[in-house]
Amino acid sequence: MEIAKEAVAGGADWIEIGTPLIKSEGMNAIRTMRKAFPDRTILADMKTVDTGAMEVEMAAKAGADVAIVLGSADDSTILDALRSAHKYGVRLMADLISAPDPVKRAVELEALGVDYINVHVGIDQQMIGKDPVSILMEISEKVGVQLAVAGGLDSESAAQAVRAGARIVIVGGNITRSDNVTEAAKKIRKSVDSPESVDIRDRGTVDQEIREIFKEVSTSNISDAMHRKGAMKGIHPLVRGKMVGPAVTVQCFPGDWAKTVEAIDLAKPGDVIVIYNESKDIACWGGLATLSSLNKGIAGVVIEGAVRDIDEVENLGLPIYTSNTVPNAGDPKGFGEINAEITCGSQAVKPGDYIIGDESGVVVVPKERAYELARRAKEVNKEEKRLFDEIRRGGTLSEILKLKKWEKI
Ligand SMILES: O=C([C@H](O)CO)[C@H](O)[C@H](O)COP(=O)(O)O
């Protein structure tokens, strides 16, 4: 309710009762919003896939103005949902989320007579890099029905969507998870009203985007996004500093530091050197290796094993995470491997996996899922910012999370 009030204050015309809220609170969510916002359009994201007439009736009787049916539902469901919508005086929006051929289906849905088509890329799909605006561009050339758009929109993509023909812009997380909902809604409102005035940033390469997000979020956010996987055990910050980069892995052996130092020459600027050296009592890293790494532009070092020259490495300032410190060093014997898969801090690390370190420790993000997990960590981060804001306003954490309600029974 608070979020809805703040979003309306920022210029939202419609209030979408999202599917998770409907699943949590049922039709009462719609009733409550209807009462609180008599002059706003209430959109019920029912995501109906069967019994179209019954679900539209439920939404209509609870006070919705528009109900959403899945565009990929059978035509019989869409048609019966439409009959029910006409009977109860509500409008029907067909949502193209996960439609195998959204352009073809949009043409069919228009012919079936829906009031709106929502070009929607779902939250999980957004995390793997899909966006609705490119699909919208194609669809808007093929249909005349009013188009809505949804799926991770921010002020830039909202402007692009309006330019591409969207009449309704549905924004979720970038408003609801913002720490200032009214300001976030105002920003979107401005983009929707004057889309031509919005500058569209170049987001750079995927790798740049991944690095940028990992620099912004914490290892705790990433661990949450990975469902508690990925955190190294027994590895702690020695020289503090945020560290983000792809791994160059080193497997070496007790008393041998040749491969750790050779890895510095192989690593590229921005890489993180990740070393497994079994010995806690003979260091495989020290001040000279640290200075050499700094010259090379390396982002940081992780060592399961030991580091020495602690005064020097602290002064040099390169982020170092390790399991131990000790004064002894070994010799350069030359055993071991560079860029083989290793285990460090009980985590498997492949060359190129993203390594992120901060005050809480180190996490390993498999390279194949780096983009998705960066995006998911960013969502966790947004959610936490919102919670911080609610606690600052005086709520307790358990009240805000409704802990009692959601405890297992
Ligand atoms: O419909 C939605 C999603 O499927 C969860 O129910 C969202 O409301 C919609 O995607 C808009 O949210 P954002 O993608 O966070 O902008």
Image (cartoon, rainbow, N blue to C red):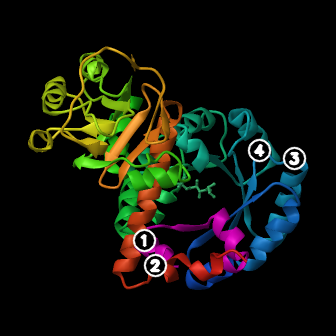
For this rendering, which residue is in front, 287 or 112?
A: 287
Q: Residue 121: tell me if it is visible.
A: no
Q: Amino acid at mark 4?
A: Leu
Q: Amino acid at mark 1?
A: Leu
Pointer 3: what residue?
75
Q: Can you give x and y, in whole percent of width and height, for residue 86 in the image?
A: 81, 65
Label 2 lies in ligand 1 vicinity (Cβ under 8 Å):
no
Q: Can you give x and y, in whole percent of width and height, for residue 210 in the image?
A: 39, 37
Neighbor class of circle 4 (other Cα within 10 Å; few <14, some 14-19, many 20+) is: many
**Is mark 2 in CB contact (under 8 Å) with mark 1?**
yes
Pointer 1: what residue?
387
Of mark 3 and mark 2, the one earlier in the sequence is 3
Instruction: State the CA–CA distance, disc 3 to disc 4.
Output: 8 Å
Q: Amino acid at mark 3?
A: Asp
Provide the secondary structure element on which disc 4 rests.
helix
Pointer 4: what residue?
109
Disc nearest the viewer among 2 and 4: 2
Ligand 1: which quarter? bottom right
Of mark 2 and mark 4, the one earlier in the sequence is 4
Pointer 2: what residue?
397
Disc nearest the viewer among 1 and 4: 1
Q: Residue 391: tell me if it is visible.
A: yes
Of mark 2 and mark 1, the one earlier in the sequence is 1
Task: Confirm whether the magenta stretch covers residue 26.
Answer: yes
Neighbor class of circle 3 (other Cα within 10 Å; few <14, some 14-19, many 20+) is: few
Q: Is residue 29 above or below residue 66?
A: below
Of mark 1 and mark 4, the one earlier in the sequence is 4
Q: Which residues are magenta?
A: 1-29
**Is mark 3 in CB contact (under 8 Å) with mark 2?**
no
Of mark 1 and mark 3, the one earlier in the sequence is 3
Q: Quadrant of residue 37?
A: bottom right
